Image (cartoon, rainbow, N blue to C red):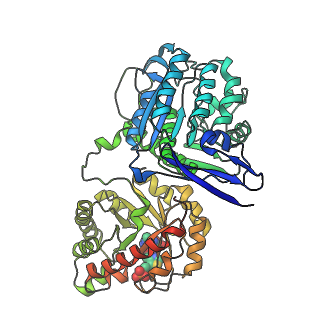
Amino acid sequence: MAFFLSYSTPIAHHKICTVFSSKQGSRHAVDQFGSLTLKAMPEEMALIVTNGSSNNKIPHVLTMAGSDSGAGAGIQADLKTCAARGVFCSTVITAVTAQNTLGVQDVSILPEESVAAQLKSVLSDMHVDVVKTGMLPSTAMVKILHDSLKQFPVQALVVDPVMVSTSGHVLAGSSILDTFRQDLLPMADIVTPNIKEASVLLGGVQLETVTDMRSAAKSLHDMGPRNVLVKGGDLPSSSDAVDIFFDGKDFYELRSSRIQTRNTHGTGCTMASCIAAELAKGSSMLSAVKVAKRYVETALEYGKSINIGNGPQGPLDHMFKLKRKNSSKLRLFEPSDLFLYAVTDSGMNKKWGHSITDAVKAAIEGGATIVQLREKDAETGEFLEAAKSCLEICHAHNIPLLINDRVDIALACDADGVHVGQSDMPVNTVRALLGPEKIIGVSCKTPEHALKAWADGADYIGSGGVFPTNTKANNRTIGLDGLKTVCLASKLPVVAIGGINLSNARSVMELGVVTLKGVAVVSALFDRECVAVETRKLHDLLTETVANVGSAVTEEV
Ligand SMILES: Cc1ncc(COP(=O)(O)OP(=O)(O)O)c(N)n1
Ligand SMILES: Cc1ncsc1CCOP(=O)(O)O
Ligand SMILES: [Mg+2]
């Protein structure tokens, strides 16, 4: 079967291309029917969508939901979430609820014509990437949504099947259930019920265990959505917050620690709008779900002692980034931070008469994009003082600083994260100690290690030794083939490590696997007289190599 790209037309900010299928001999105007039609297309058909970020278009989510006067959930939660995630959010209000921390006091459903008019105003003009739905209180509104999306297709539809408020108030009556099952779910790219909603959608089945949640995800998927996330925050039997993600093929069990707080009102809306925001930025569905879970966990953690209202349920803190106490705190981790990863070595610095701070300054001057302090021989007190000084230097340059092995040092100096190996402290324990925001890297030599790293909540993996090295004793070399196998299996960004220098870095980056984001280097930077010059040479070589292989790497993670 062959496909031909006929033309590319900027519909919204995407260049959505008309696709010809030589098998069917028919032309499918993807730009006319968007994802609604795509789901009905044969699998082998191609859709080519490129993100038009070149024209400075901000990712855009439209939320169609109810207003919450208490501002913990609904439209207000969606607006805050999208703002916090750097995504523009427009709104279609379906109902106005009078709510506070005690519960729902009143609901006024908006006239259907008003809802249709709001949708048309935004969709016809504003280049929406992703639509997210919350409270849809009438069957007519589901139909209006369907017709609007047919006329103005978007990249994805995220459906949060809001039915009952956290306080127990019914927000979508039983008469609408059939419409949800028959019309809404088949349109959805993802549906995100909590346990109660999943149970209601499935006709009242009891969901009490993670196994029940898996069956529910499968049964809901049979109703038509492309992906299902069953959220287990209310699962009585689990000490963690466990969610089940099912993409029609594989199940993923996503775990985070349960945060003890009364301030949980709006978690469902927040989760769904964060998924929508990440999709609008170009994430895959699985990555969007993982980022959203971490975002909700962080917003719960920051909001756990907010004191608003007298009722049993307060809001989370969506804007936690604004109140971080230390203004020098770094932005969130980006995979591109791994491009040139400088890992220090106290022995090498001593040999050349460099202080650790001078070595770190020089590496940053030469273009290092992230720094790890790997001070195997340092005394604890000396290590902590060096870490504090290096943190100041790194943050002055907006570069993350990680600590090798020593979670205690990272906590004491508030470093940006920790790198651990397979025999160091387990990643899930490190995550529990450091919290959701810190960066955690883990060394992986096999696909199994890589998948576990992802499941345990790491942010990146280091894979090697790619080449033989004298820096780490008794370290098995996995070669370029071993590195490629790990990269292909990894759902996390990967940095290659081990014996990498100016003569072989090109061969590493030429692997051209999308998850491979850079190289981590010790001796080729620090076992040198002039650290800045060596770092610059490697930086320039990597930049040139990536520019050449860039066109061979097609998909972003
Ligand atoms: C980026 C990066 N990748 C791998 C390692 C190795 O960590 P580990 O396996 O724990 O070995 P030690 O560095 O502790 O000897 C690393 N440090 N950094
Ligand atoms: C820490 C580590 N982990 C795997 S190989 C290695 C050593 C990397 O050092 P070098 O860049 O000098 O080979
Ligand atoms: Mg280690």
> Which one is nearer the viewer's eye here, 512 or 299?
512
Picture coordinates of residue 117 (x, y %)?
A: 50, 22
Picture coordinates of residue 197 (x, y %)?
A: 63, 29
Q: Which of the 4 image quadrants contains residue 406?
A: bottom left
Picture coordinates of residue 218 (x, y %)?
A: 72, 42
Relative placement, left or right, of 375 versus 454 is left
The answer to whether residue 449 of the structure is visible from this angle is yes
Picture coordinates of residue 266 (x, y %)?
A: 47, 30
Residue, x 46% and y 32% (percent of image)?
A: 264
Residue, x 41% and y 20% (percent of image)?
A: 69
Q: Which of the 4 image quadrants contains residue 455?
A: bottom right
Query: How many numbered marks appear?
Result: 0
Q: Quadrant of the N terminus?
A: bottom right
In this rendering, the answer to whether 376 lies above or below 327 is: below
In this rendering, the answer to whether 352 lies above or below 11 is: below
Q: Which of the 4 image quadrants contains residue 354?
A: bottom left
Residue, x 46% and y 80% (percent of image)?
A: 506
Whereabouts is ligand 1, in terms of quadrant? bottom left
> Which one is nearer the viewer's eye here, 87 or 501?
87
The answer to whether residue 194 of the structure is visible from this angle is no
In this rendering, the answer to whether 266 lies above or below 255 is: above
